[in-house]
Image (spheres, rainbow, N blue to C red):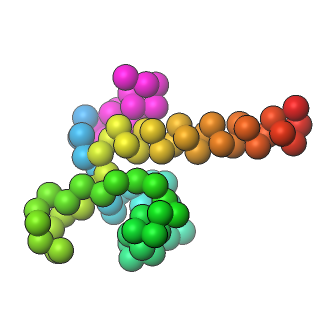
Amino acid sequence: MTQTEWFLLARYQGLPIIPVDRVIADFFPTLGKAVFLRKILDGSIKLPVVRMEASQKGAKGIYLSDLARYIDGRHEEATRDFQRMHG
């Protein structure tokens, strides 16, 4: 388990799947829910969405490990950019 996963487990009190609304509020506060989900569908945000039911209106969430990988990937990208600019 990565350090990021541990931090997220603490933040979300052990929930394995984080509701989309909470992920948006915590990590994408400038995006509305519709925009966030559209960016996931078009691949701009590479996060799989878990549907708790087959219904379109069913609860949607992000698996904690997927969110941790996404955050770590964004950090790696930022670190590479920083090294190119200031290395």
**Residue range (magenta):** 1-13
Residue 7 covered by magenta stretch: yes
Camera-side residue: 3 or 40? 40
Question: Relative to 4, is 80 on the left or the right?
Answer: right
Camera-side residue: 11 or 47? 47
Question: Relative to 20, is 83 on the left or the right?
Answer: right
Q: Quadrant of residue 64?
A: top left
Q: Residue at x 49, y 59 (%)?
A: 45
Q: From the image, which quarter does the N terminus lie in? A: top left
Question: Relative to 83, is 23 on the left or the right?
Answer: left
Q: From the image, which quarter does the C terminus lie in? A: top right
Instruction: Give the farthest residue toward the front.
Output: 42
**Residue 27 at what x, y percent from top left?**
49, 54
**Residue 28 at what x, y percent from top left?**
50, 60
Instruction: Give the farthest residue toward the right.
Output: 86
Q: Which residue is drawn at 12% across and 71% down?
A: 55
Residue 59 covered by magenta stretch: no
Q: Residue at x 24, y 40 (%)?
A: 16
**Residue 46 at what x, y percent from top left?**
46, 55
Q: Residue at x 11, y 62 (%)?
A: 53
